[in-house]
Amino acid sequence: GQQLNQSPQSMFIQEGEDVSMNCTSSSIFNTWLWYKQDPGEGPVLLIALYKAGELTSNGRLTAQFGITRKDSFLNISASIPSDVGIYFCAGRNQAGTALIFGKGTTLSVSS
Amino acid sequence: DADVTQTPRNRITKTGKRIMLECSQTKGHDRMYWYRQDPGLGLQLIYYSFDVKDINKGEISDGYSVSRQAQAKFSLSLESAIPNQTALYFCATSDGGVADTQYFGPGTRLTVL
């Protein structure tokens, strides 16, 4: 089946550092979504992207829908301890289909 | 109150037992989903339903079945649980609109001994 390649698999950073993670697909997507999962919780939507080239921010988070429609990245600036969690990208290749999820990036932040 | 609720939150059972996980939503969404999460594998889609009369298999439907009893309720059953079905299970809903954003429940941790 279709897969998303999400990288890196894990990151260990110091508080205050910037973080970048990305997802790539072998096929074109119409929608890219970024979710965060806190320990013991379900994933929560951070940012949704619907157009190629779209750049969207949510506080310290910025995500972009790649021009080729086959990739997306998420940046977190000035990380803080509560940024700890698993970040998932997800994509949809056509209307009416279910989301495809990446395997997640586990972020650890040390103060 | 949470928009998407799952019961039970934790369950330990034995091999061969029948298990039902339940999901309820108050968001008024037509679409509901069941995912399984294993460490390092992300979220894998088990089944999804776009309305009460609609059931679709996802990536890993073998060994599972579902029932969409009403718009607000979508249950997942393991007819004869096996140890490799030990995982975290999430229910999600979406409205099917242009964005079709999915909203997740808090998860059910299932352990099959």
Image (cartoon, rainbow, N blue to C red):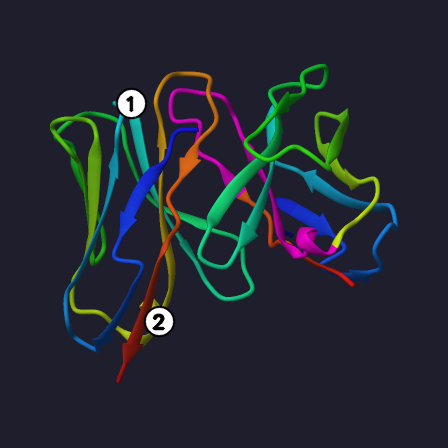
Q: To which residue does mark 2 refer?
A: A82
Q: Position of residue A111 (x, y in %)?
A: 26, 85
The picture places residue B16, in percent across and down from the top left corner, at 87, 50
Give the chain of mark 2: A
Q: Is residue A3 above or below residue B19?
A: above
Q: Is residue A60 left or right of residue A82?
A: left
Q: Are marks 1 and 2 on the same chain?
A: yes
Left or right: B64, with A11 as reference point: right
The relative height of residue B60 versus residue B110 in the rendered view (above or below) is above
Residue at x 70%, y 49% (from the top left corner): B6
Magenta includes B11? no
What's the residue at 35%, 71% (across, down)?
Answer: A82
Q: Which mark is first along the chain, 2 or 1?
A: 1
The residues colored magenta run B83-103
Give how far apart the Cα atoms at labels 1 and 2 are. 31 Å
Going 83% across and 55% down the picture, which residue do you hit? B15
Disc sitting over residue A30 in the figure: 1
Q: Nearer the viewer, mark 1 or mark 2?
A: 1
As drawn, B89 above or below A27: below
Mark 2 Cα within 10 Å, few/some/many (few <14, many 20+)? few
Which kind of residue does numbered mark 2 sit on? Ser
Mark 1 closeness class: few <14, some 14–19, many ≥20 residues within 10 Å = some
On screen, residue A56 versus residue B17, left or right, reads left
